[in-house]
Image (cartoon, helix red, strand yellow):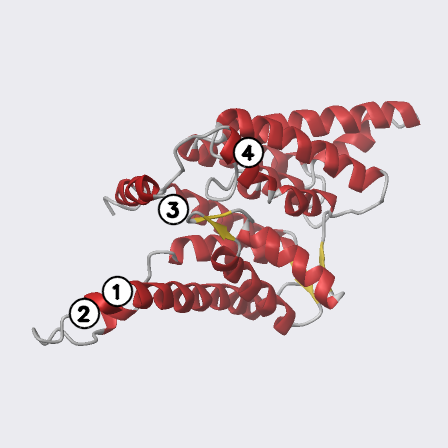
Amino acid sequence: MMNLFKDARDYQIICLGLFLVLGIFLRDWTLQINSILLIIITCLVTQIILSSFLKFNSEFININFKKKQGFYLNNLLDFSGVKSALITGLGLSLLLRANSSNILMLAGFLAISSKFIFNYHQKHFFNPANFGIIITIFLTKSAWVSPGQWGSDWWYLLLFICVGAMVLNKVGRWETSAIFLSVFIALEGIYNYYLGWNFEVLTHQLTSGSLLVFTFFMLTDPRSIPNAKNSRILWAIAIAFLSFILKEVFYINSGIFLALFMMSPLTILLDLIWKENRFCWQKKQCNILVLLSSFS
């Protein structure tokens, strides 16, 4: 218990799990418990298999047969990424809907696999859950994001903001959410005024649970967004403008998710322009990353 809340991912897991429980029991979602379990299990198993494969390749030459160390389970399996995989599984369960469980499992597999495929200097630049959502939607045509599944109750909005602020306080990426949300709200407000719509239309759009989950938990993933603060500010502004264009010009309801997907590769360029230490969840991990960067 002493180490439970030293990792910011612990807060994310609890918060996303809370939202999932609220959605199932208070919003009467059609998503079944078995579908949620399948998504989460797929994410966890994929993470363990792929990370263990990399660990095996890197440590194989270090195994000392003369001392009879041999192949033990703890030498082969790598569980270091299970928290991140669980967060991805919870995020997919909150946001993605599909016609079959197989599609949801595909999303989980693609999401985790993207961390190992689209990787530059030990850093993945696609948010795993976002990658799984977008690719599954385009591949299957039978998956979608439901922006109105949370309704428009104000107490949901307050809950998301309070809990999201708590998580951002631990992660330290609050400016990304603040800039994105401010610019996006300003653009939507100007557009609503131009069309002559009343203020209720704007508030209905902004109390979307999907928008808030995206803003506080997906957009601020510290392992896939730009490292430097200046980069994150420009990046958040660009995503806000692109999200607005996709939503209002091309009428794509899931425009915020597509905008993040399209802008994610820009992270590589921004990290090269503004150099900053990479985020890590734990101090031990930070030391390893510093050591690796010294050789790159």
- Disc 3 to disc 1, C-alpha distance: 29 Å
Q: In screen coordinates, is 74 left or right of 28?
A: left
Disc 1: which residue = 59
Residues at circles 1 and 2 in contact by the CB criterion of under 8 Å = yes
Q: Amino acid at mark 2?
A: Ile
Disc 3: which residue = 10
Q: In screen coordinates, is 221 left or right of 29?
A: left
- Disc 2 to disc 4, C-alpha distance: 39 Å
Q: Amino acid at mark 4?
A: Leu
Residue drawn at the location 24% of the way across and 73% of the way down: 73
Q: Amino acid at mark 3?
A: Asp
N-terminal of the two: label 2 or label 4? 2
Report the disc number at residue 63: 2
- Disc 3 to disc 2, C-alpha distance: 33 Å
Residues at circles 3 and 2 in contact by the CB criterion of under 8 Å = no
Determine crowd level at label 1: few under 14, some 14-19, many 20+ residues with C-alpha closer than 10 A: few
Determine crowd level at label 2: few under 14, some 14-19, many 20+ residues with C-alpha closer than 10 A: some
Report the disc number at residue 270: 4
